[in-house]
Image (tube, grey):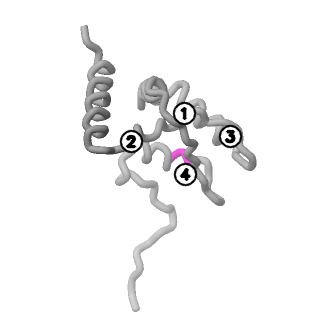
Amino acid sequence: AAKPSDLLDYIILEAIKVFRQEGVEQMSLGISPLYKVNREDNDRPSFRYLQQLLFNYGNSLYAFKALAYHKTRYRANEHKWYFCSHDISTVKAIWAILQGTHLIAPSMRPRAPYTQPLTGP
């Protein structure tokens, strides 16, 4: 019996055929969020640990491992992507990752606790 991953492979391989016929030389399979998060100079160990934890144990929320594995099967060139922040809390950084992977809708942004609408002249 066919698996969903078989259908995905078929779609991608058919798309590659069409792209080649159209003269497309390169295509992107997109990113694999949290795949191969390694130590970097000036990184935050706690943040790196949370990313690795989410990759390893958060697959019921998002298919981190399955997506990464599927993309490695095409033996494509890998390019690192970085999340950079300056003076942002780990909670806000994790929130941004969850929004970026669509685990949290963008409309669910945390609001600043002391913001009030401007009134008066």
- Mark number for residue 13? none
| Residue at point 46%, 43% (across, down) | 98
Lower sequence index among marks 1 and 4: 1
Residue 28, position as x, y percentages in the image: 41, 41
User: As rendered, which of 16 and 70 lies closer to the eye?
Assistant: 16
* Number of marks in the rendered image: 4
**Residue ranking furthest to the top:** 1
- Mark 4 → mark 3, Cα distance in angstroms: 13 Å
Q: Which structural element holds mark 1?
A: loop
User: As rendered, which of 20 and 46 lies closer to the eye?
Assistant: 20
Name the kind of residue labelled 1 in the image.
Tyr
Lower sequence index among marks 2 and 1: 2
| Residue at point 33%, 44% (across, down) | 24
Compared to residue 20, the image places residue 57 above or below, namely above
Q: Which residue is mark 4?
A: 92
**Residue ranking furthest to the right:** 41
- Mark 1 → mark 4, Cα distance in angstroms: 20 Å
- Mark 4 → mark 2, Cα distance in angstroms: 32 Å
Residue 86, position as x, y percentages in the image: 64, 59
Please, what is the dominant secondary structure of the magenta stretch?
A: helix
* Marks 3 and 2 close (CB-CB < 8 Å): no
**Residue ranking furthest to the bottom:** 121
- Mark 3 → mark 2, Cα distance in angstroms: 34 Å
- Mark 2 → mark 1, Cα distance in angstroms: 19 Å
Query: Residues in magenta?
Result: 91-95
Q: Which structural element holds mark 3?
A: helix
Name the kind of residue labelled 3 in the image.
Ser
Lower sequence index among marks 3 and 2: 2
Q: Which residue is mark 1?
A: 35
